[in-house]
Amino acid sequence: MVAAGAALADEVGLANLTMGSLAKRVGVRAPSLYKHVSSQEDLNRRIAVLALNEAADAVGGAVQGYAGPDALAAAARAFRAFVLEHPGRYAATIGVEPSGPDDPLATAGQRLLGAFTAVLRGYEIADSDVDHALRMLRSLCHGFATLQAANAFQWSADIDESFEWLITFADRGLRAL
Amino acid sequence: MVAAGAALADEVGLANLTMGSLAKRVGVRAPSLYKHVSSQEDLNRRIAVLALNEAADAVGGAVQGYAGPDALAAAARAFRAFVLEHPGRYAATIGVEPSGPDDPLATAGQRLLGAFTAVLRGYEIADSDVDHALRMLRSLCHGFATLQAANAFQWSADIDESFEWLITFADRGLRAL
DNA sequence: GGATCTGGCTAACGTTGTTAGCTATAAGCT
DNA sequence: AGCTTATAGCTAACAACGTTAGCCAGATCC
């Protein structure tokens, strides 16, 4: 049922995902949803967990067999593709905070982070820099993908080209460490 | 009145900015707000315009008198500081699209973009690269600031330190072009 | 065969966004 | 000065949404 919610969010946008519309989608009256979810916020969290796990799978899978620049490119592309294909569920991950270390949300987030950490192992990065590099990578991918998903890149230049440019930019920077 | 809305959004979060709460804040009943704004979405757009103009002022002002790496650092810091001090109004800028080229929202966005473009002039960047570099910079700053505003950086390493690290990372990359 | 659990339902309530229609004060014109 | 109009507030009311309470049919289990 949260899968249906995630799909609906992708279609109509997270802001337009209403309990009523989800109920209609699954062929049920709205109050019945509360047998599966305790509130809309709870639904949101579950969608976020699903999205983070799926994103981790996508990035982790894309990286397999690659290392260094190839792994970086594969991870970044997979991540952006996931966000663009599933903007609604990814939006559900923004602004939700794990309640504790064993919150499924936290572990799902760790999985996604782990996939990116694996990419960084292909570069020679000092231990003291790896956290910073990870945050840089996450900011870059998250920022680009969400801006594109929101249609915030207005003018001419080709967006795919910009993203490839950005990947090689990050690659060169990481090598230079 | 949109200033009051922006302030309230900063305090309680954009999601909790309701017509009723804003009305109470300005000492008026809710329907009276519609004498100034045509809908909540309209209010949102106006807050977004305000936020983008303020951000452009902050970044533009911080850059004055600097060039190259200093300008980059000043711009990035000013931008992040603005987002962290005004998370509500900045959140209002996400997901709103200008209706046309003379939409105030579009021109405000251009102003902010222009401030970052000025920073890039301190580097020797090929014309064909400047758009990509601009998008990279915007993704980086937007991504980092929004992730931090959402408390998405979980673990230990110091966040300010990461941001400084990220600035010098971008600087080195831009020089190498 | 009876008890319980599961998952649906209807009815109802509070909140929020919004519209319609009224009114008092301020500003502007003759 | 006196009439008109614009401004900006109000109350009443409605629709949509999230949510709770309470009921009920069927499946599962002892």
Image (tube, coloured by chain):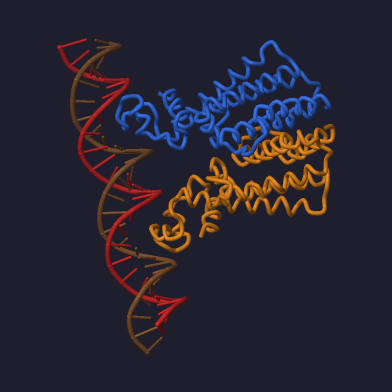
Chain colours: A blue, B orange, C red, D brown
User: Residue shown at 77%/25% (left/top)?
Assistant: A171
Quarter location, residue A141 = top right
Q: Nearer the viewer, residue A127 or B141?
A: B141
Q: Position of residue B130 (x, y in %)?
A: 75, 37
Q: Position of residue B13 (x, y in %)?
A: 53, 47
State left or right for residue D22 relative to residue B112.
left
Q: Position of residue A130 (x, y in %)?
A: 75, 27
Q: Quadrant of the N terminus of chain A?
A: top left
Q: Nearer the viewer, residue A109 or B2?
A: B2
Q: Quadrant of the C terminus of chain A?
A: top right
State left or right for residue B17 relative to residue B154.
left
User: Residue shown at 54%/25% (left/top)?
Assistant: A85
User: Residue shown at 39%/35% (left/top)?
Assistant: A18
State left or right for residue D29 relative to residue B93.
left
Q: Nearer the viewer, residue A103 or B4?
A: B4
State left or right for residue A122 relative to residue B29.
right
Quarter location, residue B152 = top right
Q: Nearer the viewer, residue A102 or A152?
A: A152
Depicted B46 relative to depicted C3: above or below:
below
Q: Position of residue B129 (x, y in %)?
A: 76, 34
Query: Total of numbered circles in the picture?
Result: 0
Depicted B50 relative to depicted D6: above or below:
above
